[in-house]
Image (cartoon, rainbow, N blue to C red):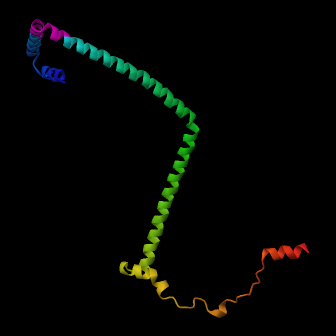
């Protein structure tokens, strides 16, 4: 992070000043090597170790990525027909849903038109909804309208007993 910040600052400096700053850093590193040779060598060794670890991790990721790609592509190939069928079903359902939405919109428009024709206001909707149940007379159908026949109900066992004789 500090190296990136230094590199960014260096790129913004004029070229002759950049050369001067580079010389200063070179002298500082030389001085550190002279004063603390073990420390500088440890830092360099530590950096080399980290770079080797990073290289091995990147190599591992690359090989695993190839394995994952092969696995995924084989799975996709194996289930391709099923995926195609599912895609068609999803598209069909999407079309059905859009058709249902348009039908619902048409029905809502017709309901609103009917409410306007019958002059049903918002306040009256709730009462109008239950009016058929509230104003219903006791006799829904007059008695003379429907003739009820008396049906004879027999049991199944009687049927089999009579046919076996």
| Residue 156 placement, left or right of 18 | right
Q: Position of residue 47 (x, y in %)?
A: 24, 15
Q: Position of residue 12 (x, y in %)?
A: 12, 22
Residue 86, picture quadrant: top right
> Residue 24, relative to residue 85: is it above or below?
above
Q: Say whether residue 118 is visible.
A: no
**Residue that extends furthest to the bottom in the rendered view of this protein:** 144
Q: Residue at x 23, y 14 (%)?
A: 46
Q: Position of residue 15 (x, y in %)?
A: 11, 15
- Looking at the rendered image, the quarter that the C terminus falls into is bottom right
Q: How many marks?
A: 0
Observer-nearest of 16 and 150: 150
Q: Position of residue 117 (x, y in %)?
A: 43, 80
> Residue 72, relative to residue 20: is it above or below?
below
User: Was residue 148 drawn as part of the magenta stretch in this picture?
Assistant: no
**Magenta segment, which residues?**
29-41
Q: Residue at x 39, y 21 (%)?
A: 60
Q: Residue at x 66, y 91 (%)?
A: 145
User: Was residue 40 drawn as part of the magenta stretch in this picture?
Assistant: yes
């Amino acid at each position: 992070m500090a190296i990136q910040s230094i590199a960014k600052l260096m790129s913004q400096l004029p070229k002759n000043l950049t050369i001067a700053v580079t010389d200063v850093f070179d002298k500082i590193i030389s001085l550190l090597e002279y004063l603390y040779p073990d420390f500088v060598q440890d830092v360099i060794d530590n950096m080399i170790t980290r770079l080797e670890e990073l290289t091995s991790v990147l190599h591992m990721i690359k090989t695993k990525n190839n394995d994952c790609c092969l696995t995924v592509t084989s799975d996709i190939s194996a289930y391709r027909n099923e995926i195609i069928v599912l895609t068609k079903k999803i598209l069909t359902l999407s079309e059905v849903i859009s058709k249902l939405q348009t039908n619902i919109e048409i029905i809502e428009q017709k309901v609103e038109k009917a409410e306007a024709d019958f002059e049903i206001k918002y306040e009256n909707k709730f009462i109008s909804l239950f009016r058929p149940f509230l104003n219903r007379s006791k006799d829904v159908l007059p008695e003379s309208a429907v003739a009820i026949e008396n049906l004879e109900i027999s049991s199944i066992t009687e049927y089999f007993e009579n046919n076996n004789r």
